[in-house]
Amino acid sequence: MSMLSMISVIDDDAAVRAAIDNLLSSEGYLVRTFASAEEFLQSPQLHDCACVVADVQMTGMSGVDLLNHMRAQGHSTPFVFITGVPEDSVRDGARKAGAVGFLAKPFAAPELIKYVEAAITRGSAS
């Protein structure tokens, strides 16, 4: 990729945010982290990120609610979801909303990288 792709990581767990930040930064991505969907929605990164990696269940707005809100606002940013509660209904809801990937915590680093790369490729193709 010729330009650095900005990845927004949204999770209410600081340790998870830090781990994903370290992983994606080591792969050459520019990473911005947010403790909530609301914090992300108020940020300048809302308009220039290549992919969102978001927890499904967070205090306040959920990851799926964030995705639906962004789609309603006309944003086509691809989403990869992570969750500590990998229920089929939650996964189905995330996929129905248009998520590129859905990973249960703890997940393997290569799995997240694979989904982020697929999301960015899909996002730039649209």
Image (cartoon, helix red, strand yellow):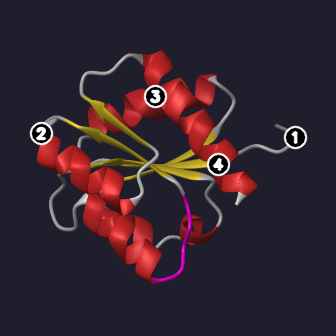
Q: Is residue 103 left or right of residue 101?
A: left
| Eye-nearest disc, 3 or 2 | 2
Above or below for 94 versus 37: above
Which residue, given by chain and number where applicable, does mark 3 sit on? 112
Q: Position of residue 64 (x, y in %)?
A: 28, 60
Magenta region: 73-77
Q: Amino acid at mark 2?
A: Glu
Which residue, given by chain and number where applicable, does mark 2 sit on? 87
Label 1 sits on a secondary structure element that is loop
Which residue, given by chain and number where applicable, does mark 1 sit on? 2
In whole angstroms, how far apart are the C-alphas of marks 3 and 4? 15 Å
In whole angstroms, how far apart are the C-alphas of marks 3 and 2? 18 Å
* First-in-chain label (3 vs 4): 3
Q: Position of residue 74 (x, y in %)?
A: 53, 80
User: Could you tell me if the residues under marks 3 and 4 are in contact, i.e. CB atoms within 8 Å?
Assistant: no
| Eye-nearest disc, 3 or 4 | 4
Q: Position of residue 12 (x, y in %)?
A: 24, 49
Which mark is on residue 122?
4
Residue located 25% across and 21% down the image: 106
| Eye-nearest disc, 2 or 1 | 2
Label 3 sits on a secondary structure element that is helix
Q: Amino acid at mark 4?
A: Arg
Q: Amino acid at mark 1?
A: Ser
